Image (cartoon, rainbow, N blue to C red):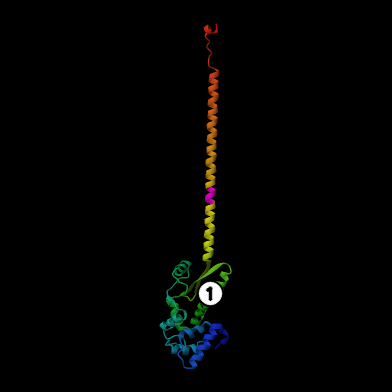
Amino acid sequence: MDMGGLSGTALMAYMNGMSALQQGKDVSSQALLSAKTGNASFGLFAEILRKSGVQETDEGYASTDDYLSHLKEKYGNIRLETVGRDQESIDKAAGTMRGDDVIIAPEILDKMAKDRELAEKIEGYIDKAFASIPKEQAWCAARGLVYDFEGVIVHEDGTVTTICGCSDSPERVAEVEREHKEKREKEAATRKAAIERGQEEAERRRQMAMEAMMQRSRISQVWETANDPLFFDMNEIL
């Protein structure tokens, strides 16, 4: 067994599993299978799996159901579904994922159950996706973002797609909403002030027009008065 491929928790889980097995103790498959996140060969694990009721042959597992049981114990939430590699199919599947899903196409599951090398390869990709979560969380957090991990999709041809990404933290979302609200309020106040200034200007012009009209009316009256004929009563003059 390549012990160099095991590190940290995986190595500890492997050593604990080996010790318990040598002592004849009952070993939970969940604890022992966690060691497979490294590059360990199937040697010891084949014996452990047999003890836990999962039958494995030299080529792979005795049945697809046995292999599916192994995957459920290892990853938890397994869904059998064929998801296309086109963006629309991936987006649709991603919308149904809860953060710990492993979606596997039934066709590739059958092949993995029969082909140990293929199973190890694909499980390695899945393990890597889950193992990278803390690192990606730290990377996003350093930029004020939140790492969103939805799960993994294993397509019919064996391609593995990790559904993940970064999004704004709730605090950042609230801050952006506040900034947008302040901007909208400022723009509304500016528009209101412009309307009020326009109304004031319109009123000023109206007043000026009325004053000009009244002035013209006064001038006209004076002119008419000035041109009125003069009549004199000669008797009064004499």
Q: Quadrant of the C terminus?
A: top right
Residue 43: tell me if it is visible: no
The tally of labels here is 1
Q: List the residue tagged with mark 1.
A: 133
Pointer 1: residues within 10 angstroms few (<14), some, or many (20+)? some
Q: Is residue 114 one of those drawn in magenta?
A: no
Q: Is residue 114 left or right of residue 166?
A: left
Q: Position of residue 48 (x, y in %)?
A: 47, 89
Q: Quadrant of the N terminus?
A: bottom right
Q: Position of residue 192 (x, y in %)?
A: 52, 47
Q: Residue at x 51, y 90 (%)?
A: 18
Q: Residue at x 51, y 88 (%)?
A: 16
Q: Nearer the viewer, residue 70 or 226?
A: 226
Q: Nearer the viewer, residue 219 or 127?
A: 219
The single residue placed furthest to the bottom in the displayed view is 23
Question: Does residue 42 sit above or below 90 in this rendering?
Answer: below
Question: Does residue 126 sit above or below 177 in this rendering?
Answer: below
Q: Is residue 190 one of those drawn in magenta?
A: yes
Q: Secondary structure at mark 1?
A: helix
Q: Position of residue 175 (x, y in %)?
A: 54, 61
What's the amino acid at mark 1? Ile
Q: Is residue 142 left or right of residue 29?
A: right
Question: Does residue 225 sit above or below 49 in this rendering?
Answer: above
Q: Nearer the viewer, residue 26 or 165?
A: 26
Q: Nearer the viewer, residue 143 or 163?
A: 143
Q: Residue at x 55, y 24 (%)?
A: 219
Residue 48: tell me if it is visible: yes
Q: Residue at x 51, y 91 (%)?
A: 19
Segment colored magenta: 187-191
For the stretch drawn in magenta, what is the main secondary structure? helix
